[in-house]
Image: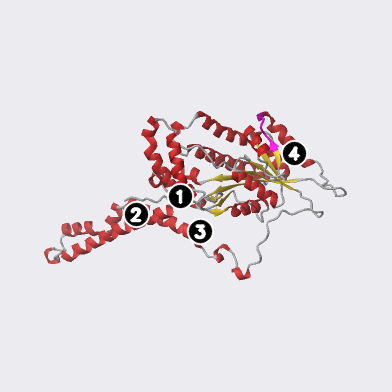
Amino acid sequence: MQVVHSEPVQATLDTLGYFYGRASDFLSSQAEALQQIDFKQYDLRSDSTRNQFTRKSSLLDVIYKHKGKIGLLTVGIGIGAFYYYNQFQPAHKLGLKPAYNMPPKPKRRVPKLANGARQDVVLVVGSPTEPLTRLIALDFERRGFIVYLTILDEKDLKYIESNPITNDINYLNLTNSYSFESQLNKFNHLLQVPVVPFAGAEAHNLKLRAVVFTPNLYYPIGPIENITVASWTKITDRLSVYLKLFSSGLIQLIRLQESKTILITPSITSALNLPYHSPESLLQNALQGLFTTLSREIRQHNLQVTQVRLGNISVSSNSNTSLKTSSIINAEIKSWNEDIKLLYSRSFTKSQFRSSPIKSSGKGTNLRDLYHVLFDLIYPKKTNPQVVYCGTGSQIYDWISSLLPVSFVSWILT
């Protein structure tokens, strides 16, 4: 049996078809055998003959013999049912009213003061060189937030100087590793000082509604032994940014302001631990563990930490995924030395094409859905959950990695 699709639902369907065919062949052969049996030749009172016939045709024997395959089939049916339930369940199961009775969709806009001034602040922790970070910051500003975006290194600083996003976005400069605490103190002071929006207006204090950590979308790929030391250093440097912020007073600031904490993390690659994507898997799994621990520690202070685990989100309009994947593969392999090519090129190419439909951003959920999720987490109607899924495949792949044996996941991906 060979499964050529990497999507779990399609793989399940292929598996179902395979075992259905095997079962049909088995039943047909047994039926033909039964038709050819001359029962008069057998003494049904004979224990040995009866036991031999039972061993060959008993359904229990068949189940026991193929228990591993039947177990796999059962898991596949469960995943298919779970996917169907989440994708096609009727509105009344979700507590929604029919469309003709539904009120107009609320516009997600930040409430302003009576004089029209803005008060609510959101701090976006991420690199402005990342397209998703810029888009999220812009959406926050358009909805009425006062946006502060971090500058994490000299590369970010040069990018902002030559490519300003908009004049309405403010920046928190963290380029000097020793300035984390001082910069956070300045930011805290800014929130404590009364603001007069215009002449004659009543002074008010700004309110930090949320700290939103945005992800990197681009990572080095290839065999672990071929990842450069410089690439690993960049990964650990990015992780250290979160640790330094938490150790330099950010959690105290969140506590004082009673702010929401939101981590946006691509989850498919890290959930499945896709081969040749070790840097991304390492960082995302570390961040998920860090924020899960943080959530459990500060829950006693009525502070909410939520992870938004992303599936496929349509960030780019480029839909020619196959051509793009082929170009990436060729460019990557071309940079390897001959020994690495000999060891990994065939496996790498096969793995990349198989995993491309899983992690492709060319197809997926509209980016607007992510904006709505973030806004609703900042202004929740009830306590935020610890984990929210957004994007095609985000939840199903998380379930696959949790429920299915590691060997089965490896079989799909390799």
Q: Nearer the viewer, mark 2 or mark 4?
A: 4
For label 4, the residue is 188
Query: What kind of residue is marked 2?
Result: Ile
Colour scheme in use? secondary structure
Identify the amino acid type marked 1: Pro
- Please, what is the three-letter code of the amino acid marked with disc 3? Asn
Sort mark 4 into few (<14), some (14-19) or many (20+) by Cα contacts within 10 Å: some
Instruction: Compute the Cα span from label 1 to label 3.
Output: 20 Å
Kindly state the secondary structure of the residue where label 1 is placed.
helix
Marks 3, 2: nearer the viewer: 3
The span from disc 2 to disc 4 (Cα, nearest Å) is 60 Å
Mark 3 vs 2, N-terminal side: 2
Check disc 1 and report the residue beneath it. 357
Label 3, residues with CA under 10 Å away: few <14, some 14-19, many ≥20:
few
**Above or below for 205 versus 185:** below
Mark 4 vs mark 1, CA separation in Å: 44 Å
Identify the residue under disc 2.
70
Measured in 3D between alpha carbons, the distance from the residue under mark 1 to the one under mark 2, in whole angstroms, is 28 Å
Residue at 64% x, 32% y: name it. 154
- The amino acid sitting under disc 4 is Asn
First in sequence, mark 1 or 2: give its number: 2
Instruction: Give the spatial CA distance, label 3 vs label 2.
Output: 24 Å
Which residue is situated farthest in the right direction here? 200
Q: Which residue lies under the disc numbered 3?
A: 86
Question: If you read the primary sequence from the N terminus, does the residue marked by circle 4 or circle 1 appear first?
Answer: 4
Q: Which residues are magenta?
A: 172-177
Residue at the bottom extreme of this rendering: 100
Q: Quadrant of the C terminus?
A: top left
Whether residue 410 is in magenta: the answer is no
The answer to whether residue 219 is left or right of residue 2 is right
